[in-house]
Amino acid sequence: MIRKQNVLNEKEISVQIYEGIVIESVLIIGENKMVFEDYLKGVYKSKGGIIRSFLKVDKGKITDITFSGDFFLLPEDAIDLITQRLIGTDTEKDSIRYVVEDVYETEKIQSPGTTPEDFTRSIMQAIGGI
Amino acid sequence: MWRFIDTDVINGAYSCALFQSIGHHVGLGISDETVLFWRVIQPTLYVGYHQCISDEVHESYCRKHNVDIIRRILGGGCGYCDRNQILYSVIGKDDGSIPRNINNAYKKVLSCILIALENLGLEGELDQARNGIFVKGRKISGNAQGRFDGSVVINGSFLLEFDFKSMDCVLKHPTMNLRPDVTTAREGMVSLSDLMKLPGINHIKQVLRTGFEEGLGVKTYEGKISVAEELLAKKLTRLYTSRDWTFRMDDKKAKRIKRKRNISTDL
């Protein structure tokens, strides 16, 4: 199913939604491309909920990142620790997963249906769109 | 012995403030573990802790039709409610009788809803992946869980009747947490009124209360909100009605875009 929605004020992006695991890939249309030049968006549906990632990458490293979605984390504010730790991380899948796994372990995060691998996939989907 | 409180109709922001305040006091050991019931006084959309309003909600529709948008401190997805749902919060101590493991905690608390359905002559089914109770494959109860200040809180809804039309207008993805094969909320959800001639609301509340007592293995006494709980709840209501809290996730993204634009200007 192809669905269009307004995201980030007036900018329209095309969102492709599939049945199953991968939910969305973001295509930037025409003139809006400059606005999103280095802000990437990935969306991945884990069993526990959708994880949207919104990030900036520079010289192979994550320089800014936010997650949103309907996933559960206990404690919920551990998401801030995950994002803080991801800043400066290499945009390699293994590095990203390692960081998220490490925060899960040190903060004793529980997140039914959502794993560090799922966060990594959301990020990698965004990065794959460079 | 657990405390049972039924506030009946209250404001959506106050409801979030209240279960947080009770959680705080239960966690400190000042208040008894509590089963709280309420209904919202006007249509309310509860939004999950991590959700962006712009991704999920038709905000202009909500403004035009006086639908309150309230961000809760629990994760998960959107829950649209009006007066025709009984909302509950099971608030226990983190080291009490509700299991520490999230899935086991859901199993225990949602078994209460299954017992209540059985006592109404219906057979429910627990869907662990979607934290919901389904009857004949359609969702009748959605739930969310959180832990803070030494308490565990599991909140949920029990649909007596449901305004599917409004929910479709309020949400951008109304079928998100339903079965993957449904295309409309009507197809994937069911209310008690679809399944039986609706008994009086007090009878349903009593059946639910008994379900919680049996499922949790406790007795409850008719309790009241303490003065300390009420004071904190009033303070927290100001937070829950603030624009900054409601749009915190949208603001996070907007700031990033703004920063990018500023950089462009500087260049």
Image (spheres, grey):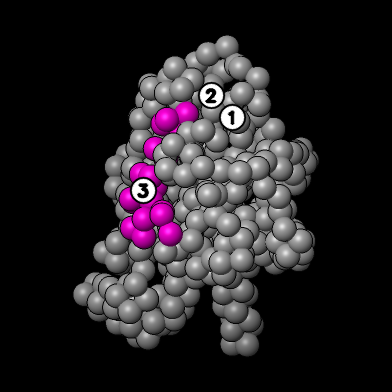
* Prevailing secondary structure class for the magenta stretch in the rendered image: helix
Relative side of A57 to B236, left or right? left
Q: Is the Cβ of the residue at disc 3 closer than 8 Å to that at disc 1?
A: no
Q: Identify the disc placed on residue B191.
A: 2
Which of the two labelled residues, at mark 2 and mark 1, occupies the earlier sequence position? 2
Chain name for mark 2: B
Queried whether the magenta region covers residue B81, the answer comes back as: no
Mark 3 highlights which residue? A23
Snapshot quadrant of residue B216: top left
**Nearer to us in this view, B111 or A81:** B111
Three-letter code, disc 3: Ile
- Left or right, B245 with respect to B176, comes to right
Q: Secondary structure at mark 1?
A: helix
Look at the image and give the residue range highlighted in magenta: B96-116
Nearest the camera: B244 or B82?
Answer: B82
Q: Amino acid at mark 1?
A: Gln
Residue located 38% across and 22% down the image: B123
Residue, disc 1 = B206
Q: CA separation, marks 3 and 2?
A: 29 Å
Q: Measured along the vertical axis of the image, is residue A122 above or below residue A47?
A: below
Q: Amino acid at mark 2?
A: Ser
Circle 3 SS class: strand
Horizontal and vertical percent for residue B223? 67, 47
Along the line of sight, the residue nearer the viewer: B161 or B107: B107
Residue A94 visible in the displayed image? yes
CA distance for labels 2 and 1: 18 Å
Q: Is residue B154 above or below residue A115?
A: above
Disc 3 crowd rating (10 Å Cα; few below 14, some 14-19, many 20+) is some
Foreground: B123 or B71?
A: B123
Badge 2: few (under 14), some or many (20 or more) residues near its Cα, within 10 Å? many
Residue B208, position as x, y percentages in the image = 53, 32
Kind of element beneath mark 2: loop
